[in-house]
Image: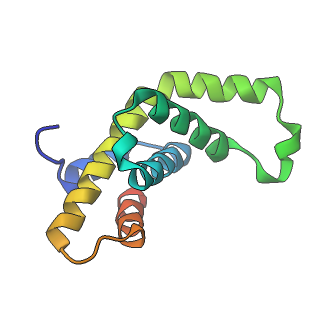
Amino acid sequence: MSRPPTGDQVRALLAPLDAIDRKVIGGVCAWMMAEPQRIRDREWLSQRFVEVCIIAQSNPQDEAAATTDDVEHVRAFAQTRMPDLLAAATAVFVRTAEDLRTEGGTVTMERASAIVRSYLAV
């Protein structure tokens, strides 16, 4: 990415995604914002992606009843969706950083989170 994607490009990238994809992107962006020095570490990023997938796809009322099928579902989801969703999360992260830079002022997690949520809103 030589130049940050525009806001319109990010919205177009996210437009076809469903709610689970958007939850995963939001969760991955939160990790990227919390630990930006680690985003080039593919193993760390992959681990965070899987953790977020588990949370995004879990049923909080029935966590104790997770089955082998649930594990297989998360594995298959991560295997097929990881490249596209990590690319989208990176685009949102970079665009958010650019938005914060151009707005000026103090950078806070709250401001960054609000920008991410605005891109992920349907």
Look at the image and tell me in which quarter the N terminus lies.
top left
User: Who is closer to the viewer here, 119 or 104?
Assistant: 104
**As drawn, is 100 to the left or to the right of 115?**
left
Using the image, determine if residue 98 lies above or below residue 19: below
**As drawn, is 74 to the left or to the right of 85?**
right
User: Who is closer to the viewer here, 52 or 57?
Assistant: 52
Query: Which x, y percent locates residue 73?
Result: 68, 26
Q: Residue at x 46, y 54 (%)?
A: 30
Q: Residue furthest right?
A: 65
Query: Which x, y percent locates residue 11?
Result: 29, 52
User: Who is closer to the viewer here, 122 or 30?
Assistant: 30
**As drawn, is 117 to the left or to the right of 56?**
left
Q: Residue at x 58, y 34 (%)?
A: 50
Query: Which x, y percent locates residue 98?
Result: 20, 58
What colour scheme governs how the chains and residues are painted in the rendered image of this protein?
rainbow
Using the image, determine if residue 31 lies above or below residue 84: below
Query: Which x, y percent locates residue 39?
Result: 37, 40
**As drawn, is 19 to the left or to the right of 41?**
right
Q: Residue furthest bottom?
A: 105
Image mark count: 0
Q: Residue furthest left?
A: 2
Quarter assignment of residue 13 = top left
Using the image, determine if residue 119 lies above or below residue 22: below
Q: Residue at x 18, y 47 (%)?
A: 5
Look at the image and tell me in which quarter the C terminus lies.
bottom left
Q: Residue at x 34, y 34 (%)?
A: 40
